[in-house]
Amino acid sequence: METKLVLKEHITDYIPQRNPIVMIDTLNYCEGSVTITSFEVREDNIFVKDGVLHEPGIIENIAQTAAVKAGYEVKKLGVAPVVGFIGAIKDLIINKLPEIGDILETTVTLKMNVMGITLVEGVSRCNGEIIASCEMKIFIQNPEQ
């Protein structure tokens, strides 16, 4: 899985977030219900304190991995990325906080998408070790609003 679908310099073409809140660098894989991204933890990240990426940054990374899938799909249709909002987080487990220089690889699996509500399962790994997982409900804003 070496092929990168979207590199860092183009990632904001696929997600509505802008710096300093961009929490993914590369879209590595997007096929069917599975999306995989990578993200390097950098010192200047707003969620980094005392040399580690804290929980809100990990959660946002999972949410943006879900968002980039939607953005990747609509970009093929020539449509701008839609805005989504985290509606609920269930069964959040954070085993470890990644440090500056670590690379997060996050996998999001789409479980359901009905009437503007998307349910995903997210798993973040660092050096092959699962550091976080959760189920996330995301509400998609109607583009006409």
Image (cartoon, rainbow, N blue to C red):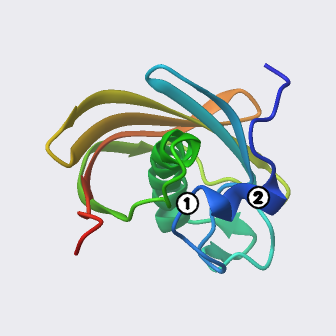
Residue 144 drawn above or below residue 2 = below
Q: Is residue 57 left or right of residue 11?
A: left
Question: What residue is pinned by disc 1?
Answer: 15
What residue occupies the far left of the structure in this picture?
115
Question: What residue is pinned by disc 2?
Answer: 10
Label 1, secondary structure: give it: loop
Q: CA distance from mark 1 to mark 2?
A: 10 Å
Q: Is residue 18 left or right of residue 52?
A: left
Task: State which quadrant residue 109 falls in.
Answer: top left
Residue 89 place in picture, x, y as percent: 26, 51
Q: Is residue 145 left or right of residue 73?
A: left
The quadrant of the rendering that contains the N terminus is top right
Q: Residues within 10 Å of mark 1 (few under 14, many from 20)?
A: many
Residue 77 drawn above or below residue 24 = above
Q: Is residue 115 visible?
A: yes
Label 2, secondary structure: give it: helix
Residue visible at 36% across and 29% down in the picture: 110
Residue visible at 49% across and 60% down in the picture: 60
Residue type indicated by callout 2: His
Q: Residues within 10 Å of mark 2 (few under 14, many from 20)?
A: few
Residue 88 place in picture, x, y as percent: 21, 54
Q: Nearer the viewer, residue 1 or 69?
A: 69
Residue 141 drawn above or below residue 120 = below
